[in-house]
Image (cartoon, rainbow, N blue to C red):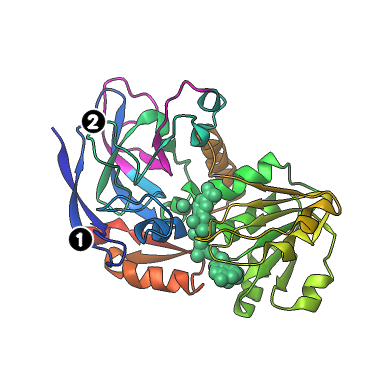
Amino acid sequence: MPSTARAFGTSAAANPLAPMSIPRREPGPTDVEMEILFCGVCHSDVHTARSEWPGTQYACVPGHEIVGRVTKVGSQVTKLKVGDIGATGCMVDSCRTCSSCQQGLEQFCTTGATFTYNSPDKHLGGHTFGGYSSGIVVDEAFTLRVPQGLDLAATAPLLCAGITTYSPLRHWKVGPGQKVGIVGLGGLGHMGVKFARAFGAHVVLFTTSPAKVADGLRLGAHEVVVSTDAAAMAKHAGTFHFILDCVSAQHDLNAYLALLKLDGTLTLVGVPEQPLAVHAFSVIMPRRNFSGSCIGGIAETQEMLEFCARHGIVSDIELIPIQQINEAWTRMIKQDVRYRFVIDMASLKG
Ligand code: NAP
Ligand code: ZN
């Protein structure tokens, strides 16, 4: 018997988010039911709800940075018990048998992972609804344990912004002796700065916002470059081992490819609405790599949470009641986020 959860969502691309009810399934033998305590606000929520990317299903309830308290577990669940603090990120299921799933890369499931919102719902039909809601039911294989000692509200953004930056920095083996660039100081970018610094690299932040320079240094960058300053950009030409591009909107990739050394890599995690132009000369001379990365698998997400607990890393957040979500989206789009909005889900009860 499905039950009902309270949520905030939208019924059309042009509409603001508003209260609505959504169905949640009764937990099955391997399911965990959580009361959602905190949900981070990712720019992907906006891209999806406003149909800036193809394929949005309405009603759309976004939210994939979820920290909650376990309220019910199925008979076969071993990872979490009632009363524990659990978490869920961008995925709630996958085929679990393809080569990607077997390597712990569920986000690249060859039949398509089930994303936390806007994916076909295997249990109830229709599509999945995300974490801007009072509760969620997730198979335990797609839940995470939140280590002791982490601030819970500031942990929520680790479930997307955290893993999306941790995973490529690990995959491309960022570490001591390397010069690493992070482009865009938003939710992803500020986690990228913290992780790159914690991994021992020399970190350079690129921002379009002069007002963020001091914060960039405080968050862990060794240097901050305002990217509209052509002379400052030119000083770094051909010097980077790795650059992580976290920008949500149109920008000139060639300006960043020009900063890579021979065999350096630029990895995109930002997903602007429109295609980005790459000039052939930006990559052929001198032999440069251009790549992308998508969130991270479940085991790596758990590893990232443990790393954060050991190193005292969480997100810098502004906690908001859900009634301020439309205003928060407007501010995020204007690059005015310091550096992740997190919704205090207790406000949904009020
Ligand atoms: P965000 O908090 O809004 O940060 C984006 C940052 O990009 C801004 O703070 C700004 O930084 C910079 N920026 C924005 N507009 C710009 C423009 N017109 N020109 C140059 N720079 C601009 O967004 P987010 O939540 O971090 O997400 C960033 C992107 O990653 C989004 O497209 C999102 O959908 C995507 N994403 C991808 C994955 C993945 O798995 N690959 C996962 C999550 C999110 P400055 O003010 O410092 O310039
Ligand atoms: Zn996200």
Residue 150 vertical position relative to residue 250 in the rendered view, above or below: above
Residue interval drawn in magenta: 69-98
Residue 322 in sight in this render: yes
Counting from the top left corner in percent of width and height, residue 133 is at 27, 52
Residue farthest to the left? Answer: 1
Question: Mark 1 is on which residue type?
Answer: Pro
**Residue shown at 44% from the left, 37% from the top:** 145
Question: Mark 2 is on which residue type?
Answer: Pro
Q: Does dot 2 land on a helix, a strand or a loop? A: loop
**Residue shown at 30% from the left, 54% from the top:** 132
- 228 displayed left or right of 129: right
Quadrant position of residue 193: bottom right
Residue 12 vertical position relative to residue 169 in the rendered view, above or below: below
Observer-nearest residue: 63 or 128?
A: 128
In space, the residues marked 1 and 2 are separated at their CA atoms by 24 Å
Counting from the top left corner in percent of width and height, residue 264 is at 79, 50
**Residue shown at 46% from the left, 56% from the top:** 154
Residue at which label 2 appears = 27
Residue at which label 1 appears = 19
- 115 displayed left or right of 176: left
Residue 127 vertical position relative to residue 269 in the rendered view, above or below: above
Observer-nearest residue: 306 or 29?
A: 29
Q: Quick check: is the Cβ at mark 2 less than 8 Å away from ligand 2? A: no
Counting from the top left corner in percent of width and height, residue 331 is at 43, 73
